[in-house]
Image: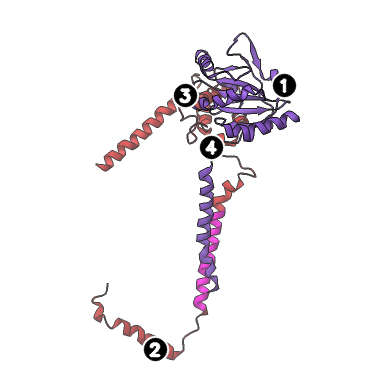
Chain colours: A purple, B red
Amino acid sequence: MNKRWLLLIPLVVFFVLLGFFLVGLDRDPRELPSTLIGKPAPAFTLPDLNAPEKMVSAQDFHGQVWLLNVWASWCVSCRAEHAVLVEFAKTNEVTIVGLNYKDKPTDAKTWLRQYGNPYAASPMDSDGRVGIDYGVYGAPETFLIDKNGVIQYKQIGPISEEALSETLIPKIRELKQR
Amino acid sequence: MKRIFLACVMGLCCWSGMALADNAVPTDTDPVAQKRAMALAAKLRCLVCQNQSIADSEADLASDLRRQVREQIAAGKTDEQIIKFMTDRYGDFVLYEPPVKATTVLLWIGPLLLLVAGATGMVFLLRGRGKEQEGVPALTPDEQARAEALLEGRTLPFPSGKGRK
């Protein structure tokens, strides 16, 4: 019969499914799209790790492009990205603020002494409330915030050298020129 | 033996599930608020261990989110306001039951579409079969007789049904 081609349908369906699964293999289910992109960075006012009498707020960085890096001394992958951040901070390309997420101040200070301090300020989010406002579900996470205080990009997971040079730096330069 | 083992495993699973759920019991003494907090926590996904609700999860973030739920209930927020608080920060992914909207409509009606497609396919297939049989020209009396003879002849090697399986 001329309806032989109908027999091919299961095969076609199979390959379509196979395609979906193959794409799915390469995707990281932990990378969730942030709902905060394009929205104003949530406000916070928190004591600074290195000077607890001083308060740091998101408003302090209004008018400039800045990175909010969520880190903690207990976070293993933060260590991986820390060296990249320390090197990057030396270029003075952008202000890096380190949101010290659910950490003990003594541990956090020791960590910065040991591995270097790339942060212009380290607001302490001891109980993780600011983290929740930023939709943080696992350190490290990094938010790129523009001059108007709007979140433009979110990096989930450690910043690798490639992520920095291929994604973050071009975005930072573009935002600075706006 | 196997059954006993299985029963033990299942029992353990239930028990540990209950033990974990215990963690989500709010500290406040109002039983209505407790019930609401539990129900909300069961609806919200833990983002660290993505296949558990924040009621089931022992992750740090889950307990922080449970605290948020309790505090907001205590502050007099409605369930809708609390759900919105969560989705504003974590997106629809935080909900176990995604809302019906343009991007999720396929998710919701997909199974129904597949069912309809399958049923339609089935109907066409069966109809087609019926037509094929109708399309076969009727036998002439002569052909009919030959066919009957052939059919009888085929049963001959098995006299009185012996040897047939």
Q: Is residue A47 depicted above or below A88 in this figure?
A: above
Q: Is residue A9 above or below residue A48?
A: below
Give the mark nearest the N terminus, 4 or 3.
Answer: 3
Q: Are marks 1 and 3 in contact (CB under 8 Å)?
A: no
Q: Give the extent of the magenta segment.
A: B113-134
Residue placed under numbered mark 4 in the picture: B96
> In terms of depth relative to the viewer, which is nearer, B125 or B89?
B89
- Badge 1: chain ID: A
Mark 4 element type? loop
Instruction: Tell me the CA gap for discs 1 and 3.
Output: 41 Å
Quarter of the image for the C terminus of chain A: give it. Answer: top right
Q: Amino acid at mark 4?
A: Tyr
Let me know if residue B128 is in the magenta part. Answer: yes
Q: CA distance from mark 1 to mark 2?
A: 98 Å
Q: CA distance from mark 4 to mark 3?
A: 20 Å
Amino acid tagged 3: Val
Q: Which residue is mark 1?
A: A62
